[in-house]
Amino acid sequence: MKKIAVVCAYPAGENPGMLSVDLAFGSVARTLPEPVEVNYFCGEGPFELRADQTLLQYQHLARREQLLSHDRIVYWGDFLHWIGYFENDLKYRASRRDPGADLEQVRNAWYDLFLLEGASAADMAKVVVFGSTLYGLDARQLAAPRYHQALGTLYRHASTVLMRDQVSANYVSQIARDEANAFGCDCALLLDPAPLKAYQKIEVPPGDYLVYSVGRSGANRALQGLAAEIAQRRRLKLVNIDWLGNPLGVPALADRLAVIRGARLVVTDIYHMGVSAWREGVPVLGIGQGASQVHGTLSDKKKEIFFRQIFASAYYLFVEEILQAYASNKLMDAYLTRVLAGLDRKPDLDFIFTTVRRQQDAAARKLRAALA
């Protein structure tokens, strides 16, 4: 039986987006032609993802030898090979766990465990990078010889590199694989939500409703008001699923997805809530700051990039324009008339949903081939 190691980001707080990503690998594994043994790893410590029973058990990735005994080594989703992720997330959490930690040793361990340095060509040939992102890369980071060389070496020798977004795919083609199309999709797009229905605890609201949740882009009160105004104009009930709030975990994810699935429209400034809704066949008005800079993993740019690569830029709203529209009733009326017109263009929405399915199918097919 083939053994597959899946290296995941630390699922901090069991938030629904990260759970969607990690559970999605199981959806893919179940479609492989032969049974496989899948072992999940996390570089920051052991972790169990529980529901009625343990669904996933992450081993603490402390030595690269834990990976090298596998037939395939999959770096799954998130920002795992971005130096900005190390500087802003991993290093911070390492200091929180151990205030006396030698951060240079932590850095060296990241290079080692993520096979950026020290691995043989044969070991790197086992690597599949899928659904990861490097869209925050800049010249300052790549001007550092150690990181530039390490990233390019791994991505040149890896069996397969399929990134989450087209910006990252373009970067990979320039740095390491100029002959290849390195665009895949977000891992969460490959989640089969059907098995999660067994954990659903709530009833879906009756009637036609709009689902919203905000909390990533600032101006929460204004965005909540916008959702209420849209619901009123569309004669929809307003339902807040509080994507980022308690409770968390698998049953909470199942509940939120069930409510999204039954909605007529989703309004959100949360990346994976938007990804999940498009996957479930529900139109989304996404929200983010147009002036957002990419300083960390929560930049609003990742939402804008996602909407553009599924041809849904008309359904992505900028916070700055929303706040300008609040200046008068006339401005808000004109703004909402323009925004909501897209929801009545069924051919446009059909094209977007077809695009999402096409990206899902193509990425899943390439991933299954890489794992076979």
Image (cartoon, helix red, strand yellow):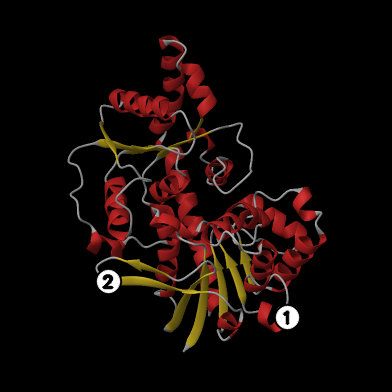
Q: Residues within 10 Å of mark 2 (few under 14, many from 20)?
A: few
- Name the residue at 17% across, 41% down: 206
**Image location of residue 150, percent across then percent down:** 75, 67
Visible in this render: residue 233? yes
Q: Residue at point 40% right, 59% down?
A: 19
| Residue 230 in the image, given as x and y percentages of width and height | 34, 26
Camera-nearest label, 2 or 1: 2
Residue 68 lies, with reference to residue 258, above or below; the image says below
Q: Which mark is residue 121?
A: 1
Q: Residue furthest bottom?
A: 1
> What SS does tag 1 mark?
helix
In this rendering, would 257 be left or right of 304? left
In this rendering, does residue 366 appear at all?
Answer: no
Q: Secondary structure at mark 2?
A: loop
- Give residue 74's position: percent from left, percent from top: 56, 72
Residue at left offset 31%, top offset 51%: 257
x then y, percent, for residue 273? 41, 46
Q: Foreground: 126 or 262?
A: 126
Residue closer to the observer: 156 or 265: 156
Amino acid type indicated by mark 2: Gln
Amino acid bearing label 1: Ala
Q: Earlier in the sequence, mark 2 or mark 1?
A: 2
Q: Which residue is mark 2?
A: 53
To which quarter of the image does residue 102 belong?
bottom right
For residue 358, the mark is: none
Left or right position of 291 against 122: left
Disc 1 packing (10 Å; few <14; some 14–19; many ≥20): few
335 w.r.t. 161: above or below: above
Residue 182 picture quarter: bottom right
